[in-house]
Image (cartoon, helix red, strand yellow):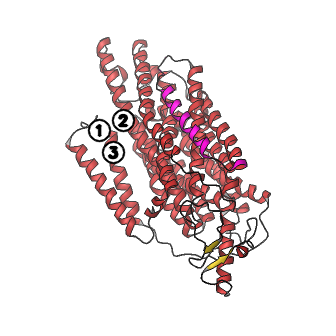
Amino acid sequence: MTTTPPDQPTGATPDATRVATPAPSSSTAPAMSRREVLESLSGILLGMFVAVLATSVVSSSLPVIVNKLHGSQSSYTWVVVATLLTTCISTPIWGKLADLTNRKTLIQVALVISVVSAAAAGLSHNVATLITFRAFQGLGAGGLTALATVLIADIISPRERGKYMGLMGSIMGVSMVGGPLLGGVLTDSIGWRYNFFVGLPFAIAAILVLQRTLHLPTVQRRSVRIDYWGAILIAVGIGTLLVWITFAGDKYDWISWQTFAMVGGSLVVLAVMVLVELRTAEPLIPMHLFRNRTLVLAVVASVAVGVAMFGTSVFLSQYMQIARGKTPTQSGLLTIPMVVGLFLTSSLIGQVISRTGRYKRYMVVGGVLLTIGLVLLSTIDYRTSFVIVSVYLFVLGAGVGMLMQNLVLAVQNTLRITEIGSGTATVAFFRTLGGAIGVSALGAVLANRVSTSITDGLAALGVPADALGGSSSSIPDLSAVPPAVRTLIEQSYGDGIADVFLFAVPLAVVAFVAVCFLKEVPLGDKSGVQQLLEDELVAESFEAGAVENHVVPEDMLAQAPDVGRRGTAS
């Protein structure tokens, strides 16, 4: 197996390559044609679409869903956070499995888990059941998120990967923000429960397409050892932190013994997790990856992208429906400018990166646009023109489109093929973690601001607190309150959600700084399959005695295939 320095592109070939360990063997066959690559890619992208759609399709319907199930603002937040938390925790597990076993089978299993749990969530009759099945749904989504990017790395070289990453970013963007439009239509026409069933036909199609088109080399199987302690410690540490964020300032004061106990306990558990990861044979998150400067900076930037991507979709639906009185369908339509911004920049910039091999300059611009977009959205209120809001959303979408998948591309370009799964999953883990913590924290801020504003406003109007049909923290039904109270609610949510975007601005600035410090490494020109086949050639040459002193000459590596080959279907 060839070794690659931490910041050396995966496709690059040095003058002499040292042999580390015998490489996995693979059955060779004719080269994959462009048509075969595109066919395989269609199934991978369809799987990615299912993962994001299953998460996002309920966004515009959540105010209706939580209201029908008699939930509170905290319940609203946890319907989203439960999915993000389990996605976050399971992503490194899927990534580790991707480095150890059959990736094609894994992504099909992830598809099944995602859609079955989504369908079960659609049968919920209370908020607790809904949150539980949404948590299971996150397990499948974690697999799809990690494995789709890893499989693209298997069949496409880093140099060509830019345009395909752009396509993947577009798929994520369309499903992330287009999903709420579909969910709104379903809710307004046939009922909110159908939001959870809409992914079934797409998942079945993805499984069939992957079975027919995705062909990977048959690799030597390693014994699969899952770091269960690492997974448990991450779940406990992050889960405790999210519970604290959700209830601080409501159930207890921010500065209280509960805060010290929960935050202190969470930090201790996470510190133990790091020690476990340093000592275990197959760590969930390999700590040595953090010696890679590109990965560390990408992780920092991904946290901000996660907050922007998930937080925007969650709180925009509340802004459109509660602060502006729109229906779920109208709410979805009004977020289209963000889809357009993300789709255009992700697709166009991906093409440019593939042609030029340069990516940092576009990521820097993306960091600037992300920051500007959040600053602009922090100025909106319940009377802001929808034209202006659309412009702000377009700017934010353009920033996310330039950053999201290009951060993954930059990291994959500096990792050895045997670490692509873990490295990709690590970036996705922190992006989702940023989304989970961000949504939880921003949701807590919103709940506190809205509750205080409504309570004070009702007192000023001389209206009894039960005019909302519940507590001031419940998701209100605007059609059931007097006009004066309705205006108060709209103003409270408009101002509160603007504050949410303002609190996210510092994270965007951190992402911009992290991207500025990225070292741009030339994109490699070999796919993951090519690297495996090259490693096989090196190993075979070594066994045959053609390699001396563990060094493979450049002319021998030149015999490796110029294009990816495929073997027995996995």
Residue 183 in view, yes or no? no
- Please tell me which of labels 3 and 2 falls first in the chain: 3
Whether 279 is drawn above or below 495: the answer is: below
Whether 353 is drawn above or below 208: the answer is: above
Q: Residue at coordinates 58% horizontally, 75% vertically from top-left?
A: 221
The picture places residue 271, in percent across and down from the top left corner, at 32, 58
The picture places residue 472, in percent across and down from the top left corner, at 34, 26
| Image quarter (top left, top right, bottom left or bottom right) of the C terminus | bottom right
Q: Residue at coordinates 53% horizontally, 33% vertically from top-left?
A: 60
The label shown at residue 248 is: 1
Q: Residues within 10 Å of mark 1 (few under 14, many from 20)?
A: many
Answer with the quarter of the image where residue 100 lies.
Answer: bottom right
Residue at the disc numbered 3: 243
- What SS does tag 2 mark? helix
Identified by mark 2, the residue type is: Ala
Q: Alpha carbon of mark 3 to alpha carbon of mark 1: how far? A: 8 Å
- What SS does tag 3 mark? helix
Identified by mark 1, the residue type is: Ala
| Tag 3 near tag 1, CB within 8 Å | no
Answer with the quarter of the image where residue 143 lies.
Answer: bottom right
Q: Alpha carbon of mark 1 to alpha carbon of mark 2: how far? A: 8 Å
The label shown at residue 217 is: none
Read off the magenta span.
Answer: 355-383
Residue 379 colored in magenta in the image: yes
- Please tell me which of labels 1 and 2 falls first in the chain: 1
The picture places residue 559, in percent across and down from the top left corner, at 75, 73
Q: Residue at coordinates 62% horizontally, 73% vertically from top-left?
A: 17
Residue at the disc numbered 2: 444
